[in-house]
Image (cartoon, rainbow, N blue to C red):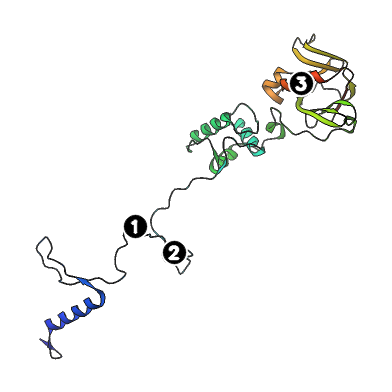
Amino acid sequence: MRIGGMRRPALVATAAVALAALYGCTVQAPGQDGRHRSPVHIDIPGSRTPSAHRSTAPPSGGGAGGSAPSTSPPAATTAPVLWSRGDSGRDVRELQARLRQVDWLFDGPTGTYDDLTEKAVSGFQGKRGLPRTGRTDTVTWQRLRAMTHEPGRWELYLMGGQPAGAPDPRCLTGRVLCIDKTSRTLRWMVDGRTVSTMAVRFGAQYTPTREGVFQVYWKSRHHVSTLYHSPMPYAMFFSGGQAVHYSYDFAARGYAGGSHGCVNVRDEAAVSRLFAEVRVGDKVVVYW
């Protein structure tokens, strides 16, 4: 058949040559099945399948008019870590207080992310199907917060470590044991200067620690109570049978207990140094 004075086979060949010149081509050998395929393979620019090394991510800044996003699954993300071993501060203290509420931590709070805290966090994570890293990430913290209540002041400072309040004006002259019931602290002060500060515990409801201005009238290094038959090491008596002294119970249980009116100190090394410095006749101020 002729088309415009040209036979059909010649027309097809001419078109193929024109396309090859325009786009580039390769001659295809017969397939392995012996069947003949088109002798001309046309490679149109942009029609190749992206290679495995070519990025399929959408261009940066893509919006409504950008390319379609990649359909490949997103990479796994890790929750940001809030605190880990070696950290310290008020937030770590709250973490420890909340771990105590769910019985994963028994010591503290201390405010320092130590090995016991790391172990407690790891146990809490494992029990709830979270990665056992021992580090407190945002997911672990949210789960713990959902299971606990906001810790109160003395939950945060169960074993001491709380900051002292401003000293009473009566403590600013001379040698004074300045004892603040509000912050539960004892300052040893000399001429208005704070020499040392330590956490203290007071009498229970029916055996309160007396308030007022007193003097140390007797010191007894290895004292034992004749009334309660309990040890009172480093005792510095200031009002009847009430004294400042080291307490084994305070050291073990913190503010979970109370005294029979004495001012208990839980830091034995601190009260030992204090006992060596305080003299009979030094002033004692106990106040709210």
Q: Residue drawn at (29%, 66%), measured in percent from left and top?
A: 48
- Residues packed near mark 2 inside 10 Å, few (<14), some (14 to 19) or many (20 plus): few
- Residues packed near mark 1 inside 10 Å, few (<14), some (14 to 19) or many (20 plus): few
**Nearer to me, 202 or 193:** 193
Q: Tell me which label, 1 or 2, sits earlier in the chain.
A: 1
Q: Name the residue under label 3.
A: 273
Q: Do the residues labelled 1 and 2 touch (CB within 8 Å)?
A: no
In front: label 3 or label 1: 3
Q: Do the residues labelled 3 and 1 touch (CB within 8 Å)?
A: no
Q: Mark 1 points at which residue?
A: 53
In front: label 1 or label 2: 1
Label 1 sits on a secondary structure element that is loop
In front: label 2 or label 3: 3
Q: Distance between the residues labelled 1 and 2?
A: 16 Å
Q: Tell me which label, 3 or 1, sits earlier in the chain.
A: 1
- Residues packed near mark 3 inside 10 Å, few (<14), some (14 to 19) or many (20 plus): few
Q: Mark 2 points at which residue?
A: 59
Question: Which part of the image, by quadrant, shows the C terminus?
Answer: top right
